[in-house]
Image (cartoon, rainbow, N blue to C red):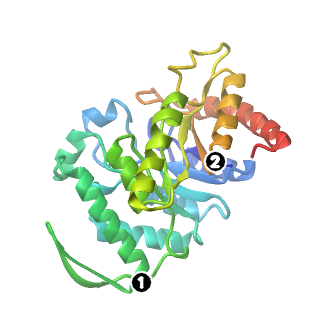
Amino acid sequence: MKFGLNLPNFGADADPQSLLSWALRAEQYGFHTLMVSDHVALTPQVQAGFPAPFYEPLTTLSWLAGSTSRIQLGTTVLIVPYRHPLLTARVTANLDQLSGGRLILGVGAGWAESEFEALGVPFGGRGERTDEYLRIILDFWTGETVSRATGDLRFHQVATQPKPVQRPHPPIWVGGHSTRAIARAVRLGNAYHPTSVTMPWLLHVGIPQLRRIAEREGKAVPSLCPRIKLAITDHALDEESRRIGEGNVLQIGSDLSALAKVGAEYVIFDTTEKGQDRRPGQSDADWATIDRLVTKIVDLDAQGLR
């Protein structure tokens, strides 16, 4: 099992120095992956969960690529309908090139209706649009030219070079908890990337549904790469309602062991909370929590669970 971090790219604690510090420290600690979230239009609805300033993910990752050398760089998750697929495909191909093949593209269909409205993108049909845009991105990454004449997309023999370094293409991690999102992971993704879920949901709903859809589609079951909350408490939390990664050290250790047993390939730790007032200095508190986590991971290594 590999481990990564969600980099807080929003709130008053986020600035270039903080972003760079997170990246360098994560690489020094030996984390495999660093991922950032995505919003474009910070409407009141969006700011209720993700306050300004908000650093655009692809720009941020391109900058961090030049200051790091080993750690993988990803999105958790890029909202696919927000950007024209040719733009997303070209920027991400360039990012994979410039980083030496370190991109992971985590994707989702989006949830903030006001943000769609601000960007002039229909909120309805976003699932279908996400699927079609992903197909175009995959065609762009793997072909010499790409063409489309469907819906509102009309382009012919658009050249795709430079190609991504990774072959056949950078991994796509599909987020979301709906049946459609899980099916998207099977049909178009390399990994299923659920976020902030409980262990009962993952074991009894998410994973079984992923396997049923893969069997029905005649496809391989995608890798499991969840993003989990990291919130260490002094007391045990209720097992049925707590999200994976929340609770005392024993509960979080149990979560990591359970994820290892079901074959999780990556686990991304998220120290943020939606709507959290990320004042200056919040990153110091986050890293104190991460330090405790690293000690637990070392224990797992000793037990052969990673």
Residue 110 visible in the shown view: yes
Name the residue furthest right.
Answer: 302
In the picture, measured across the screen, residue 272 lies left or right of residue 27, that is: left
Q: Position of residue 115 (x, y in %)?
A: 24, 44
Residues 285 and 18: in front is: 285
Q: As shown in the figure, which amino acid type bears the numbered disc 2?
A: Gly
Q: Position of residue 240 (x, y in %)?
A: 52, 20
Q: Is residue 205 above or below residue 35?
A: above
Neighbourhood count class around disc 1 (C-alpha, 10 Å): few under 14, some 14–19, many 20 upward? some
Residue 76 visible in the shown view: no
| Camera-nearest label, 2 or 1 | 2
Residues 56 and 208: in front is: 208
Element on which disc 2 rests: loop
Name the residue furthest top.
Answer: 235
Element on which disc 1 rests: loop
- Residue beneath label 1, please? 161
Q: Is residue 185 above or below residue 22?
A: below
Q: Position of residue 67 (x, y in %)?
A: 62, 61
Mark closest to the chain's N terminus, 2 or 1:
1
Residue 83 tag number: none
Q: Position of residue 260 (x, y in %)?
A: 68, 42
In the picture, measured across the screen, residue 48 lies left or right of residue 249, that is: left
**Residue drawn at 63 percent across, 40 percent down:** 259
Q: As shown in the figure, which amino acid type bears the numbered disc 1?
A: Gln
Q: Is residue 168 above or below residue 177?
A: below
Task: Find residue 140 and report its image quarter.
Answer: bottom left
Query: Could you give the CA–CA distance between mark 2 and mark 1, rounded to whole angstroms?
Result: 36 Å
- Residue beneath label 2, please? 263
**Residue drawn at 50 percent across, 44 percent down:** 15
